[in-house]
Image (cartoon, rainbow, N blue to C red):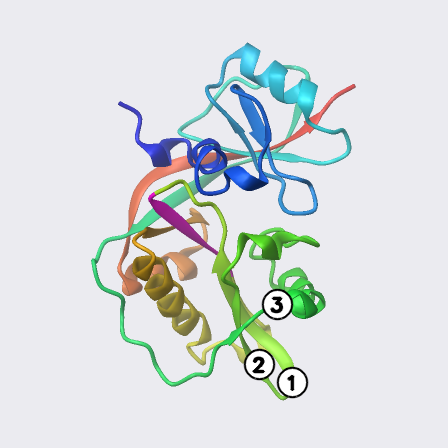
């Protein structure tokens, strides 16, 4: 039987992120100002055709798949990379330090977009904040580190947008934000998980130190509709 995390985007758009999803019984996607994610019930030609029919031109569609799949000619592959899926293994959260974390709100979106554009943890769009539970660290009025939550394939919640300004690395900010997010997710009765590119050795080492273990390797596809 397929595990819910083998098709995390589709299952998130059926469960915890259902209120944000657009689509039908074969294909769903997020509004393009929230995220580029798209989910398919399976990777049949029919499901891809359904996504093609309902999704807009001019914006990429990001799929996470449990291995390589056949992409129809109606879609152009912009990116295909190995992606590791890691799951938190402990029933308790790691201890927090003393760094002051601040809840981020709509008025912080410009600073959040500036930071994510600089550090590239993944796309952060005009309304990505609606995924919820974003927290940051400020120094001298500047947002220098942040992390939040994204996909929610119940009972799992993904930690995302973990990033630190290059001038403030080495201070443990990412680890502190991660510990906080783990605590929030466990307190809600969910299990933390995340995705990281397989070639991002530094991030993988941090996540393993915090208690995450690789569950499996996925493929990430970034696709573009062809006319």
Q: Residue at x 43, y 83 (%)?
A: 99
Quarter of the image where one finds residue 180: bottom left
Estimate the x, y position of residue 186 in percent, counting from the top left: 30, 59
Above or below for 34 versus 59:
below
Near mark 1 (Cα within 10 A), the count class, few <14, some 14-19 or many ≥20, is few
Cβ–Cβ under 8 Å for marks 1 and 3: no
What numbered label is drawn on residue 105? 3
Residue nearer the viewer, 131 or 193: 131
Q: Residue at x 42, y 50 (%)?
A: 158
Q: Is residue 202 left or right of residue 47?
A: left
The residue labelled by disc 2 is 138
For the stretch drawn in magenta, the main secondary structure is: strand
Near mark 3 (Cα within 10 A), the count class, few <14, some 14-19 or many ≥20, is some
**Does the magenta segment cover residue 160?**
yes
Quarter of the image where one finds residue 12: top left
The residue labelled by disc 1 is 141
Estimate the x, y position of residue 150 in percent, counting from the top left: 50, 50
Disc 2 versus disc 3: nearer the observer: 3
Residue nearer the viewer, 62 or 11: 11
**Does the magenta segment cover residue 220?**
no
Cβ–Cβ under 8 Å for marks 2 and 3: no
Estimate the x, y position of residue 53 in percent, counting from the top left: 69, 18
Distance CA(mark 2)–CA(mark 1): 6 Å
State the SS at label 1: loop
Cβ–Cβ under 8 Å for marks 2 and 1: yes
State the SS at label 2: strand
Q: Residue at x 43, y 33 (%)?
A: 11
Q: Quadrant of the N terminus?
A: top left
Range of magenta residues: 155-161
Mark closer to the chain start, 2 or 3: 3
Mark closer to the chain start, 1 or 3: 3
Near mark 2 (Cα within 10 A), the count class, few <14, some 14-19 or many ≥20, is some
């Amino acid at each position: 039987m397929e595990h819910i995390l083998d098709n995390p985007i589709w299952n998130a758009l059926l469960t915890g992120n259902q209120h944000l999803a657009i689509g039908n019984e074969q294909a769903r996607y997020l509004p393009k100002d929230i995220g580029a994610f798209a989910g398919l019930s399976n990777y049949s030609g029919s499901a891809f055709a359904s996504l093609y029919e309902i999704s807009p031109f001019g914006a990429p569609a990001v799929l996470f798949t449990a291995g390589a799949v056949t992409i129809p000619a109606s879609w152009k592959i912009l990116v295909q990379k190995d992606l590791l899926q890691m799951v938190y293994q402990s029933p308790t959260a790691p201890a927090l330090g003393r760094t002051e974390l601040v809840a981020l709100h709509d008025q912080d979106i410009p600073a959040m977009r500036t930071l994510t554009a600089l550090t590239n943890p993944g796309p952060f769009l005009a309304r990505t904040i609606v995924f919820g539970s974003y927290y940051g660290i400020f120094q001298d009025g500047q947002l220098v580190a942040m992390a939040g939550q994204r996909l929610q394939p119940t009972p799992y919640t993904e930690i995302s947008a973990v990033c630190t300004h290059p001038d403030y690395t080495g201070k443990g900010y990412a680890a502190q934000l991660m510990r906080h997010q783990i605590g929030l997710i466990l307190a809600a009765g969910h299990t933390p998980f995340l995705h990281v590119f397989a070639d991002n050795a530094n991030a993988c080492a941090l996540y393993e130190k915090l208690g995450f273990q690789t569950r499996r390797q996925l493929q990430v596809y970034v696709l573009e509709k062809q006319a």
